[in-house]
Image (cartoon, rainbow, N blue to C red):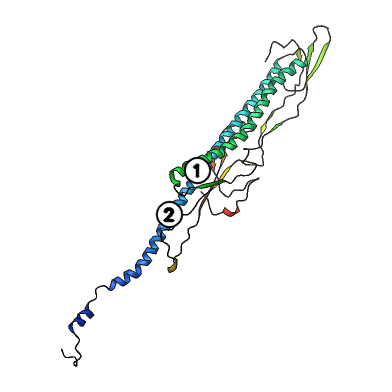
Amino acid sequence: MNRQGGHRPAWTRRLAGDQRGQTTIFVALAAMVLICFLAFMVNLGQLVHDKILAQSVADMAALSAANVQAAGLNEIADINMEYKALERDLKRWLVAGTWVNAGTAQNLVSFFTNFMSVCNTMAQGASTIYAGMAHVVAYRVLEWHNREHGGSRPFRMVPLVGPVYPGLRLTALEHRGQEFQAYTHIVPMICCQQAAISFVPFRLMPITPSSAVGIPAAGLAVWDSYLTRDSETVTYYRVLVWREPVKVFANLPDLGFDVRLPTIMAASLAMPTGGNIEDCKPDYIARFAPVDSRFKYDIPFYPYKGKYSH
């Protein structure tokens, strides 16, 4: 080989013309970027999956609890219907019957009013019991969801309802009605020829063995009474559900790829609508409502406003 002539060895010429392995460098450089994108997609997919599950359990819990509240309000409407029916029967008996004396008529009034008092007590109890059962049902939904989808990262929930309504009661019930007036009933005395005038301070009732022949006076006082809700409050059920984030698929802080996944949160609000307690219409059903709705006796919802919805 003539080195002075500038000729290179054959092996150097072969090496200079061999381009195999050049892409290895580019693949090595791009692999890190591809891994970062893959980790990002896996982490994002896990976040979306957790968000869907969290929103599902929030909606299920809120709607189930609101259905219990609707059942409670329907029960109160039915009780109110019975309450009004008792008053209607009382009036019919008082109008139809002619009584020996005011005490006899008052006994019949007391008989019916005792049952109306029972109705009132039942309605107050339903307002409290169904409010508590709404919480029980919501947490049972959460327990079922955790058994099915919770795994090592269970979902957690807190009801965002007011401390008074509907947290402890569905609503405040109170008796409403006109001021009663005495009605006059003229009864001929059996022992003498003089007429006696008796005043019964209540509404008017079918003929019983205690009735006697007499002359009912005209213009008998009639007034309606019923149970009514607190007009300033709304019955609803709102929940906040969250889940701890999953461990990141790949985290490379030394290369500037430092990922911290947020806690997944979801909120939902449902409420009974469609019925009417005062009109004795047990037509309440549960419907979703905007999650950031504001109610009297509500607790602050500002940290979540506009972030979490159905």
Specify the farthest residue to the left: 1
What's the residue at 72%, 21% (across, down)? 110
Callout 1 amino acid: Leu
- In depth, the one of 10 and 70 nearer the eye is 10
Specify the farthest residue to the top: 191
What's the residue at 60%, 34% (across, down)? 129
Any part of residue 65 in sight: yes
- In depth, the one of 259 and 236 nearer the eye is 259
- Name the residue that disc number 1 marks: 142
Q: Residue 32, which numbered label? A: none
Task: Establish if 200 lies above or below 265.
Answer: above
Spot occupied by residue 233 in the image (x, y as percentages of width and height): 65, 42
- In depth, the one of 298 and 37 nearer the eye is 37
Spot occupied by residue 260 in the image (x, y as percentages of width and height): 48, 60
- Name the residue that disc number 2 marks: 46
Q: Kindly state the secondary structure of the residue where label 2 is placed.
A: helix
What's the residue at 51%, 52% (across, down)? 265
Mark 2 residue crowding within 10 angstroms, few (<14) / some (14–19) / many (20+): some
Q: Is residue 57 left or right of residue 112?
A: left
- Between the residue at mark 1 and the residue at mark 2, the CA separation in whole angstroms equals 20 Å
Q: Is residue 286 left or right of residue 48?
A: right
